[in-house]
Image (tube, grey):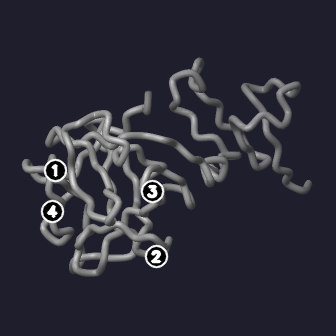
Amino acid sequence: MAQQNTLCHSGDHHAKGHPWVQTSGRASEVPPPNAEESGSVVREDRRPRSYNHLEGDVRWRRLYGATHFFLCIDSSGKVQGTRWKESPNSILEIRSVRVGVVAIKSVHTGFYLAMNKKGKVYGSKEYNPNCKFKERIEENGYNTYASLHWHHGDHHMFLALNGHGKPRQGGKTQRQHLSTHFLPMLVS
């Protein structure tokens, strides 16, 4: 007799096709009662998650740093922090260019946030590979932004504002530093 792969649930043949249990012609493995609710069942039909719907997402935000400064890019392309919440240079367009990767542009000045291979943060009139940042939500609820293109040895280089509102050199930053933590605040 040929073995046949079927799906069943505790002998209930009406559940054929249900992804709980896979049998191979032998005794079936039955999940414990309420196993699906408890999350203890591994589903055979699980697929990798797709976040393609996030690509191209555009948000207008002010990035408020844990050092109490709003990130801004002025009309000369200089990146710095300001304590003035209403600064027009602090309104940023955060555009998802692919899953987990964003481009940040000042709405008022048109400059893109960029980081060069030495970790210097600057404003670029033209969009280029230096303008791509990995956006990550940290455990404390803040976001960090690491250069996608450049690294310092094996370490990421992060966007950071020091306690005086000046950009920190990317090679001197780490994910754990509070100077690298930003809250994207809604523009009102």
Q: Amino acid at mark 2?
A: Pro
Mark 1 or mark 3: which comes first in sequence?
Answer: 3
Task: Determine whether, in the image, residue 166 is placed left or right of residue 36.
Answer: left
**The disc label shown at residue 168, or none:** 4
Label 1 to label 3: alpha-carbon separation: 20 Å
Q: Is residue 30 visible?
A: yes
Mark 3 or mark 4: which comes first in sequence?
Answer: 3
Label 2 to label 4: alpha-carbon separation: 20 Å
Mark 1 or mark 2: which comes first in sequence?
Answer: 2
**The disc label shown at residue 167, or none:** none
| Disc 3: which residue | 105
Image point 14% across, 50% down: which residue? Answer: 165
| Disc 1: which residue | 179
Image coordinates for residue 111, horizontal then vertical, percent: 42, 63
Q: Residues within 10 Å of mark 4 (few under 14, many from 20)?
A: many
Mark 3 or mark 2: which comes first in sequence?
Answer: 3
| Disc 2: which residue | 129
Q: Amino acid at mark 3?
A: Lys
Q: Is residue 104 visible?
A: no
Image point 16% across, 38% down: which residue? Answer: 68
- Residue 10 position (above or below residue 27): above
Label 1 to label 2: alpha-carbon separation: 24 Å
Q: Amino acid at mark 1?
A: Ser
Asked whether disc 1 touches disc 4, contact meaning CB atoms under 8 Å apart, the reply is yes
Q: Nearer the viewer, mark 3 or mark 4?
A: 3
